[in-house]
Image (spheres, rainbow, N blue to C red):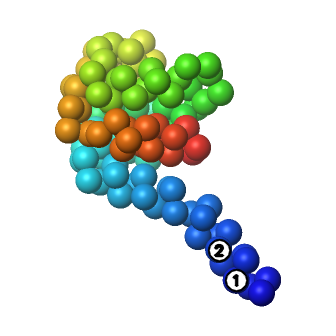
Amino acid sequence: MRYLMALALAVAVSTPAVASMELSDKYECGDCHKMDVKPGATRKKKEGPSYKEIAQEYKGKKGVEKQLVDSIKKGSKDVWAKKMGKKTEMDAEEDVTAKDADALVKWILSL
C-alpha cells in the first residue's frame, strides 16, 4: 500500500513538468528559450532568456502569471533588452491555447 501511494505521489509531482516540457516542444519554444544558460555564454541572435532566468526574474511577483501568459499570446518587445545586452522581441504565439500558455507559465515559474 505504501508503495502504491509513493508511486502515485511521484507520478503526480512529475507529470506537470513532463507535460509542460512536451508543450514547450509542441510549440517549439526551445527554438528561442533554453532550459538554462551559463553566465557569459554567447547567445544566438534570436535567443531569448532561458526558462530558469525567467523563473528567477518573476517567481513570487504579484500578477506575473497573467503578464507572462500575455507575453506568450501577444508577444513582447525589449522586456529583457537591458539584462541581455541586446534588443529583444518575442513574437505573438497565437497558436498556443490559453490553457497551454497557462500550463507553460506555471511550469516555468516552478523551476
Look at 62% across and 61% down and name the residue there: 13
Look at 51% across and 40% down and name the residue there: 106
Amino acid at circle 1: Leu
- Which residue is farthest right? 2
Which numbered tag is attached to residue 4? 1
Secondary structure category for the residue under label 2: helix
Residue tagged by mark 2?
8
Number of residues whose C-alpha sits closer than 10 Å to that of mark 2, classed few (under 14), some (14–19) or many (20 or more): few
Look at 36% across and 44% down and name the residue there: 100
Q: How many marks?
A: 2
Secondary structure category for the residue under label 1: helix
Q: Which corner quadrant holds the C terminus?
A: top right
**Image position of 86 (left or right of 55):** left
Quadrant of the rendered structure where residue 82 is?
top left
CB under 8 Å between callouts 1 and 2? Answer: yes
**How far apart are the two marked residues, 1 and 2, measured between alpha carbons?**
6 Å
In the rendering, at what x and y percent does residue 12 appear? 60, 64
Q: Which corner quadrant holds the N terminus?
A: bottom right
Which numbered tag is attached to residue 36? none
**Image position of 43 (left or right of 17):** left
Amino acid at circle 2: Ala
Q: Relative to the observer, which residue lies in front, 91 or 44?
A: 91
Q: Relative to the observer, which residue lies in front, 21 or 98?
A: 98
